[in-house]
Image (cartoon, rainbow, N blue to C red):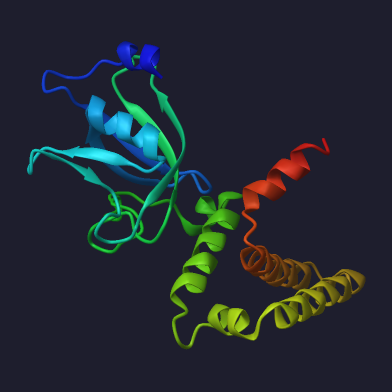
Amino acid sequence: MDFEMNLLKFDAHGLIPAIIQDVNTDEVLMMAYMNKESLQKTLETGRTWFWSRSRKELWNKGATSGHYQEVRTISYDCDADSLLVKAVQTGAACHTGERTCFHNPVLEAAAEDSASAGILNEVYEVIMSRKREMPEGSYTTYLFTKGIDKICKKVGEEAAEVIIGAKNRNREEVIYEVGDLIYHLLVLLGEQGIEPSEVYRELAGRR
């Protein structure tokens, strides 16, 4: 990375903006500044480090909150004056407790326009947060509490419901039941410690 480090254009204060993006959902989580030292520590530790302009010191994201960012990739833009860091986010990225720092909408797409394949990753992240925090009253918590036998049973039941809907030629029923099946499959992946991206790579190999 030394050669690429020299290519980067740090500003007059020795800083470069770093955009942090969820590696699974592509959601933009936050933006902060790095200097050469914090970037080097990020590369060495595999977790994000930044330079605090207000405190005038290095800070390791998650050191006090436990909401670490495990770095997967780092790239720079065409002008070499900003970074894109893709990471696995534990907990909330924002100090307010919100998942992302960009939680104040100015313009929002209609719900039907915002749905995409990325929703699978978003649902998986919610499932994993339930697994970590185990909030009372959550159906996902209930499944993790009951364990693998219950989760597998639900996968089987939902698969059967999909088959019934398909045999009935009921479009709405198929859509609903496939949604249930996919949710329970994501819970199963979470129980096994498998990320959706691993399944995506398996599918990509079958093209």
> Residue at the spot x=25%, y=25% of the render?
36
Looking at this rendering, what residue extends furthest in the right direction? Answer: 167
- Quarter of image, res 82: top left
Give the quadrant of residue 121.
bottom right
Q: Give the vertical position of 190 relative to 26 (above or below).
A: below
Judge from the rendering whether residue 194 lies leftward or rightward of residue 101; answer left or right: right
The picture places residue 13, in percent across and down from the top left corner, at 11, 23
Query: Is residue 125 shown left or right of residue 158?
Result: left
Quarter of the image where one finds residue 178: bottom right
Q: Residue furthest bottom?
A: 137
Specify the quadrant that holds the C terminus.
Answer: top right
- Classify residue 25 as left or right of residue 13: right
Which residue corresponds to the image point at 79% horizontal and 37% vertical from the top-left?
Answer: 205
Quadrant where the N terminus is found in the figure: top left
**With respect to residue 42, does 119 lie above or below?**
below
Q: Nearer the viewer, residue 127 or 43?
A: 43
